[in-house]
Image (cartoon, rainbow, N blue to C red):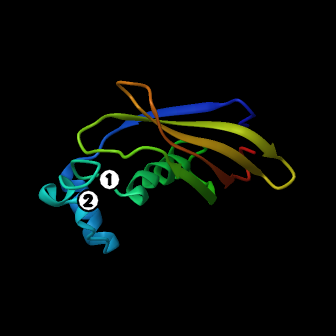
Amino acid sequence: MLEVGNSYEIEFSFTQEQVNDFCKISGDFNPLHWDEAYAGTTPFKKPIIHGALIASVFSRVMGMEFPGEGSVYLKQVSEFKRPLFVGTTYKARFEIVSTNPAKHTAEIATQVFELERGKLMVDGFASALHTELF
């Protein structure tokens, strides 16, 4: 059983090729994500990663690692505090903040930090259902 306070961390990064693939999959071809010349004219100065691609890390972890296989990802709320860039390593952190054993659900804090500087990049929470772990 997983309990309040249990946590999980994973490091990740994305390449520009992965971002370009996500453009094709999602249909979001905003030049801010793939065009260096265009992105250079923005306050970001270089292409930024799609928020939905970053959230895919949450989906992967929730479904495969923590709580893991058999879980149903019910909800995700995310606040993107800073832009994320290709080639930079980040750490996603998950912590169970509450559980409802009667419904087999949990609220899980979901955060992304830039690994090198420790800056909070994404802050949010998720809800998950797992009939055996909550």
Kind of residue indicated by mark 1: Ile
Left or right of 95? Residue 23 is: left
Question: In the displayed structure, does residue 81 sit left or right of residue 46?
Answer: right
68 versus 28 height, above or below: above
Tell me, yes or no, whether the two marked residues, 1 and 2, touch with CB atoms within 8 Å: yes
**Which of the 4 image quarters holds residue 2?**
top right
Task: Give the labeled residue for mark 2.
Answer: 33
- Say which element carries label 2: helix
Of residues 85 and 23, which is closer to you in this image?
85
Q: Look at mark 1 in the image and give the residue it sits on.
A: 49
Of residue 95 and residue 49, the one placed in the foreground of this image is: 49
- Please provide percent x and percent y for residue 102: 87, 52
Q: Position of residue 118 (x, y in %)?
A: 43, 26
State the CA–CA distance, disc 1 to disc 2: 6 Å
- Residue 3: where, in percent of width, then height? 75, 34
> Which residue shows up at 22% across the image and 65% down it?
31
The amino acid type found where label 2 is placed reads: His
